[in-house]
Image: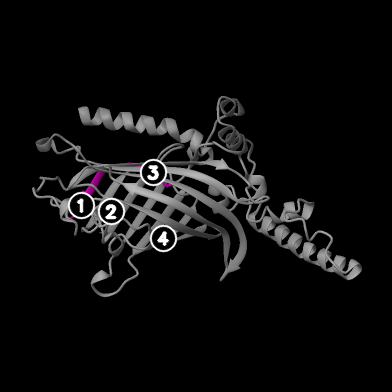
Amino acid sequence: MRIHVLASSLLIALGGVSTPLLAQESITEPATPQACFALDSDAARLACYDKVLGRSPADTRAADAAASAALQARKEAKASAKELDGEDPRRNELFAHDELASLAANAGRGSLLDSRWELAKDSKLGRFQLRAYKPVYLLPAFWSSNPNEMPHSPNPNNTATQAENLDSTELKFQLSFKTKIAENLFGDNGDIWVGYTQSSRWQAYNSEISRPFRETNYEPEVMLTFRNGYSLFGWNGRMTGVSLNHQSNGRSDPLSRSWNRVVFNVGLDRDNWAIMLRPWYRIPESDSDDNNPDIEDYIGRGDATVVYNRNGHEVSLTGRHSLRSGDRSHGSLQLDYAFPINNLLRGHVQVFDGYGESMIDYNHRATYVGVGVSLLEWF
């Protein structure tokens, strides 16, 4: 009974967070404009009105075409100015704010990546508004093919000496959000976001060891993002970014695990698809302080996520790899599928195979299958 009460409380708490994060994802069927009026968040209220009144965002292709035409017109205007005056009179204006520049800055408005990162000029919602980041879900059934009862590391201070009697089925949940703290640092481009993600694995059904939280991973980060406007093999390059990322499990030795990374982000999308490529560089630590010196050979040196979203159904596939060969060649694949249940909840299925499902399991291989519900997905 206690487990069901705690799980229900968690779900209610998640539901309370979802509305201000991203209204268009958590409020899919509002009843009346009066219902929208009650929302506190400006972003949530605007998205609710759009849904009730049937407003659709501008076609991404139209925004891209207008931006492309504006850029071409600016090039022609500059060329004409040089011919007439011998030089471009605006050469000293680093960031010109004319009508053409405004059109160019709206490239990709309404695209998948723009909906999450406010890339276009008219998509900006200002600072300090909570937004969705990574998926938010509760998986009451999360099964492992090979529970890691003796975590180990090349650092002898981080190798367990006593096995723990773990159940193969536990409960997993994830919370994730971000907010913008600075906007348009370079003319009409360049935003700084801070994000936080927390994922927990709870031995909720293991009464023999008092149902402990087996592993919780904490991941704060700060990100600088830029809007892009190029095409590559039919994909639209929407954004690039760089972030400073910390990830740890907040435990003491021998179970402590942590690392710090500089992560580079490249985002592309087309129609109902999006791709995020993330190579990273691990910030070195001293040998004595390094809980997991070979973590890059298992969790990897980069990942790639492909997302497909259509009519409320979303499939995402994330792959990581060490980018090494031989004995240092390791990686993982994670597949998530979410589907509508009602106007708030989605069913959620997760399958993971490989190394590093969590920090404590960074060099442990297993297959995991989770089933539950989610409130927010990637898009």
Relative placement, left or right, of 355 versus 373 is left
- Span of residues in magenta: 134-145
User: What secondary structure is found at the residue carrying circle 4?
Assistant: strand
Mark 2: which amino acid?
Glu
Label 3 or label 2, whichever comes before in sequence order: 3
In the rendered structure, does residue 66 fall within the stretch colored magenta? no
Residue position for label 1: 144
Label 1 or label 3, whichever comes before in sequence order: 1
Mark 3: which amino acid?
Thr
| Image mark for residue 280 | 4
Q: Residues within 10 Å of mark 1 (few under 14, many from 20)?
A: some
Q: Residue furthest right?
A: 84
Label 4 or label 3, whichever comes before in sequence order: 3
Label 1 or label 4, whichever comes before in sequence order: 1
User: What secondary structure is found at the residue carrying circle 1?
Assistant: strand
Please state the horizontal and vertical placement of residue 241, each as a whole percent of the image: 52, 56
Relative placement, left or right, of 137 versus 216 is right
User: What secondary structure is found at the residue carrying circle 2?
Assistant: loop
Q: Main secondary structure of the magenta part?
A: strand
- Whether residues under marks 2 and 1 lie with C-beta atoms below 8 angstroms apart, the answer is yes
Residue position for label 2: 357
Q: CA distance from mark 4 to mark 3?
A: 18 Å
